[in-house]
Image (spheres, rainbow, N blue to C red):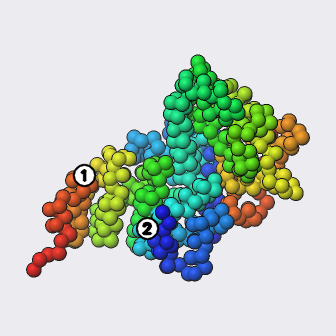
Amino acid sequence: MSDWNREKRREAHSSEHESRSHGSSRWSHCRKRGVDGSLRTKRDPEGSDKAHNKERHDNRNDSFRTPESAGPVSRCGRRSDWGSQVEDDEMRRDVHRDMQRRRILGGDATQRERRASSGSSGSCDSREGDSMETDEGVLLRRQKQINYGKNTLAYDRYVKEVPKHLRQAGVHPKTPNKFRKYSRRSWDQQIKLWKVKLHAWDPPTEEGGDKSLHNINELGLDDVMDIELDFPSLSDSQDAPAPLSTHSLSLEDEDCMGTPVKVQRTDSTAEPGI
Amino acid sequence: MENSSDDYRIQAFDLDTQMLLKTALKDPGSVNLEKVSNIIMDQSFKDQVFSKEAGRICYTIVQAEAKQNGSVFRRNLLNRLQLEFKEREETRGRSLQEWVCFVTFICNIFDYLKVNNMPMVALVHPVFDCLMRLAQPDALMNEEEVDCLVLQLHRIGEQLEKMNAPRMDELFFLLRDGFLLQEGLTSMARLLLLEILEFRAGGWLLSSTAHKYYYSEIAD
């Protein structure tokens, strides 16, 4: 099975790279020649469906690679591996379902009820009169960031320990409401602060850093580069980057990566160069 | 609904592996899920009986893992499936049996692994690609492949059509042509093709008279 495993890791690499805009597939169809100078053959259209063409990546010109990837690399943000496609699809559906709920629940009556109760989680928090955030791209991005925070041991422990009706504003972390209108900076900052607060519920270990890595493994983060991931120490709320492997690791077999080729330090300016 | 492990047909595996699979079904987070997905897939490509229902065990593991907030198994499964799909032509060249098992498996996954009760969009075109391949003239000459093709259409044809009707039309153009024009088809192959043509024409249902024709014992 070693061949298969090698292939798979290369796939994982290349799908990670997709999010780093090293692919040029968006423009490649306009180019007459590939990177190596050879004339590109006209791709025969198998269907007008865009999703369909996206899956024809396996036919893409071999010249569209990065040094680390074994295969052609696609435009950042559009992951062509099936695992990611299905996850993205699932998230899109969840977000749409949430939107529908908000529209129905976010009406007048519910607002009055909500004000009367204390410590609600703000699920109907789009203020009356404010329009909801409805841009799908924005909602998906925000949902992804929320998911990263929620897929942590810290969050699990927090939720078990503190039931919603006992949450105190300011003390207990509250998931930012993706349906409210915020600027990008404001939103990103809220997420950051939320995650910092969640760390108070990290499971006890010798080094806090190890647990972060464990969480990363559980998440299978292969497109982590498109959001900032800071894990500052609790005493210091500034952006103090911690070393983080941004590989999409084979999740149970950490040791087989050896020394990660690209152990990156995340910092607030994001993209590490290759 | 608690399925006994018999429902998953894991008897084909050795006892250690059976243990591993049973654990994966109950507590996925405690096992190496990449390994589990590979084991299941390897077996599916060898064993057509297993591949016909392997989707079920996969679905259960995916659900169990989702409760633990994980998605390792599904991701591994799909990505390996994608690799195998890319190499399907080589597989077919090497072994018809493996190729047929692969198609059976991917269709079974399409059938069972739903996302929010909808089939996985990512698999629609690949599944069609496989079925179209089975409908090619060279494949129609092999009863094994025709048999596989009609079996899959019986099981997932209706769902597939809902996801992409034009491609289903395209496929059935090929099937009509195959039935009508292909020389050298065995009579069994022609029978299978005729039945599936009628099946779809009836809205993915065989009329009772047609059913009698195709499936009743011939009276002496």
> What residue is pinned by disc 1?
B203
- Label 1: few (<14), some or many (≥20) within 10 Å? few
Q: Can the viewer see residue B1 in this picture?
A: yes
Q: Name the residue: 56% across, 76% down.
A: B18
Q: Can the viewer see residue A80 in this picture?
A: no
Q: Name the residue: 45% across, 59% down.
A: B112
> What residue is pinned by disc 2?
B53
Asked whether the beta carbons under mark 1 and mark 2 sit within 8 Å of each other, the answer is no
Nearer to the camera, B182 or B13:
B13
Q: CA distance from mark 1 to mark 2?
A: 25 Å
Dot 1: what SS? loop
Sooner in the amino-acid sequence: mark 1 or mark 2:
2
Left or right side of A118 for B181: left
Left or right side of B29 for B77: left
Q: Name the residue: 62% across, 64% down.
A: B28
Q: Name the residue: 70% across, 31% down.
A: A118
Q: Amino acid at mark 1?
A: Gly
Image quadrant where residue A175 sits: top right
Q: Amino acid at mark 2?
A: Glu
